[in-house]
Amino acid sequence: DAGVIQSPRHEVTEMGQEVTLRCKPISGHDYLFWYRQTMMRGLELLIYFNNNVPIDDSGMPEDRFSAKMPNASFSTLKIQPSEPRDSAVYFCASRVGQGPEAFFGQGTRLTVV
Amino acid sequence: GQNIDQPTEMTATEGAIVQINCTYQTSGFNGLFWYQQHAGEAPTFLSYNVLDGLEEKGRFSSFLSRSKGYSYLLLKELQMKDSASYLCAVRDRGNQAGTALIFGKGTTLSVSS
């Protein structure tokens, strides 16, 4: 398996624009997690899904953020409109059941100018 | 909620032993995890403790005391490639069948020759 795949790897956008980040989890993994990492706040959980159903979105910063998982092999995180404070590395991770190991994608580095 | 504390930075020399401490508070403990993250890369799983005691895996060991809300990661025979950020994370019993990892801000370890 190629692991968790995220796209794009880098995104530079202007304030106010819509940004869509994409994630393909490892096949067979039933949990998918979206995290955001900054120097100040570390790695923060935004939202996670189990069998394509959102379980906990309490970490989503505000209504500008939304996430979907239309099927077991694809998820998106959308920011509309984007703001400079959204600049961060966004990681997607997947896991099998209650297994101990979550596998992270390589992340998307988002810069909002 | 959860609260996780670990030192921001540590330094050590090649061949030495270093211990990275982590204290946590959580409403319903269900596992303590350590991840390694090299600069610019994704976090990768190192170890997992759910019961008290020491788990050893090669040069790395992780210890857990649930009563004290305390864990440490022990790295022996340090190598330059061990320079990275080490993230402590907890999983707690949510109201669903599965829960996500909540991460501390990480400890940046610098190994010098």
Image (cartoon, coloured by chain):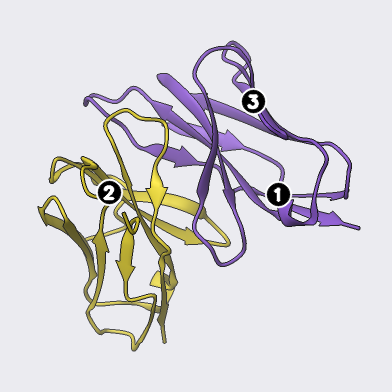
Q: The residue under label 1 is which amino acid type?
A: Thr
Rounded to the nearest whole Å, what is the CA distance between mark 2 and mark 1? 26 Å
Classify mark 3: residues with Cα within 10 Å, few (<14), some (14-19) or many (20+).
Answer: many
Q: Position of residue B52 (x, y in %)?
A: 59, 12
Q: Residue at x 80, y 50 (%)?
A: B79
Chain assignment, label 3: B
Mark 3: amino acid: Ser
Does B77 appear above or below A110? above
Residue A94 as seen in the image, left or right of residue B25: left
Total marks placed: 3
Secondary structure under the numbered disc 1 in the rendered image: loop
Q: Check disc 1 and report the residue beneath it.
A: B8
Residue at position x 34%, y 89% from top? Answer: A14
Chain B palette colour: purple
Question: What percent of the width, then of the height, locates residue A77?
Answer: 24, 64
What letter labels the chain drawn in yellow?
A
